[in-house]
Amino acid sequence: MTLQDQIRQIGQQARQASQVLARTQTSLKNQALADIAKQLELQKGSLQAANAKDLEAGKANGLDAAFLDRLTLKDATIANMIEGLYQIIALPDPVGTISDLHYRPAGFQVGRMRVPLGVVGIIYESRPNVTIDAAALCLKSGNASILRGGSEAIHSNQAIAQCIYTGLTNVGLPKTAVQLIETTDRAAVGELIRMAEYVDVIIPRGGKSLIERISQEARIPVIKHLDGICHVYIDDKADLDKAIKVAYNAKTQRYGTCNTMETLLVAQGIATQVLPPLVDKYQAVGVELRGCQATQALLPQMKAATEEDWRTEYLAPILSIRIVANVEEAIAHINTYSSQHTDSIITEDWTRAWQFLTQVDSSSVMVNASTRLADGFEYGLGAEIGISTDKFHARGPVGLEGLTSQKFIVLGEGHVRG
């Protein structure tokens, strides 16, 4: 069988399984998730033995320590995977929920019902825990899933997939409801993202080059974000303690995440009060600072920021700082350079806060809160399959509801159109 035939067969099986899942009761989906959690616990030794093969190969191939850390299935990692399954079990099932049901003047009712998307293809790198997160979210939302993890985690992903297959079959659901593409041939990705007759949406999770490739080549709708160029703007009506606390957390809580602040904007009226103590805190933990001319005039020890800095997602302890005249200039800067991921204003003036909320065009816009809160778990979604900066079909963290669509339903009593 050719690679193309293999991927098409996976697609056909997923389409058939999606029709079963669409009519599966919540209780049975939850039973499957609970059984998968049980299998992960029972097979922990097998999971870590498979993971050891990936780690050995990764070291031989020169993967750096941070990459190997993301790849490692520690006891805590497996425990978190199991806990994540139970969190998804506890979430309400969006499938079948009806909203906006109302009577029309002619006497019939119109509403909307949530339904699964169908077949979801997920393409991801390095982290084997994504295999369980993606499969579980798709299963709970009634979608069949096709998973294509990175070659560096192939043995780990295969071992996790076996736990998923066992859990599904133990409760009578088709094992093809979740399918892992087991070939490491990169051509498999090209086949998957062009298989529009069987796959309804593609979700890439990984580096910018992967997501750019998927976006350019896919013949299927893609839910994605490319960059996380996130901003915090400290207004001259900000509470100083709040401003320092939020801006420090937004940059330093974790450096390598898509919701980490990369540019700090400060109103000129408060710059002399907030920047010196904040810069001291950044420098104490080794953050490299790059400032505009006004910022450098205030703090000469800072490097000069270039035009490219405003457009850069560092994913590192580097921060660009710009002093702006007012909230209008801050909004203009954000809407010029932001990747439409997450942006925040620190202010006690709710007129300005509202202006920021309504005029900043990003998937998450915040008031007096750290950008690091832009996360499916923090938003109460239980988990997320990714974050979308697109405007169709989902925007922001994509949880269970983001993996569904809506259809109109009409309830009549013999109504006809006159």
Image: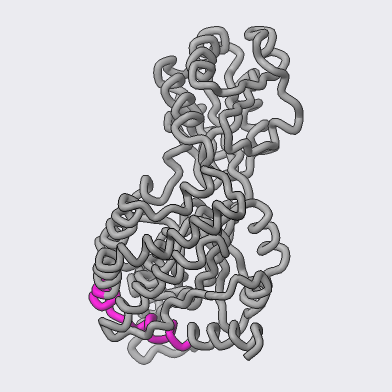
- Magenta residue span: 16-31
**102, above or below 175, in the image:** above
Inspect this view and state whether residue 139 appears: yes
Is residue 335 covered in magenta?
Answer: no
Q: Is residue 309 left or right of residue 85?
A: right
Q: In this view, does 71 lie to the left or right of 168?
A: right
In the rendered image, residue 58, in percent from the top left (x then y), is placed at 55, 55
Based on the displayed image, in which of its 4 quarters is residue 20 positioned? bottom left
**Which residue is pictured at 47% across the width and 50% down the height?**
70
Q: Which residue is drawn at 37% across and 60% down?
A: 48
Magenta stretch contains residue 26: yes
Height in image: 394 above or below 239? Answer: below
The location of residue 392, given as percent across then percent down, is 58, 61
Left or right placement of residue 140 versus residue 217 in this view:
left
What residue lies at 36% left-to-right and 49% top-to-bottom?
A: 377
Here the colouring is: one colour
Q: Quadrant of residue 113?
A: bottom left
**How many numbered marks appear?**
0
Q: Can residue 92 be seen in this view?
A: no
Furthest residue in direction right, as rendered: 307
**Image location of residue 106, percent across then percent down:** 40, 79
Q: Give the residue displayed 38% in from the left and 75% down from the top.
A: 162
* Residue 258: percent from left, percent from top: 54, 43
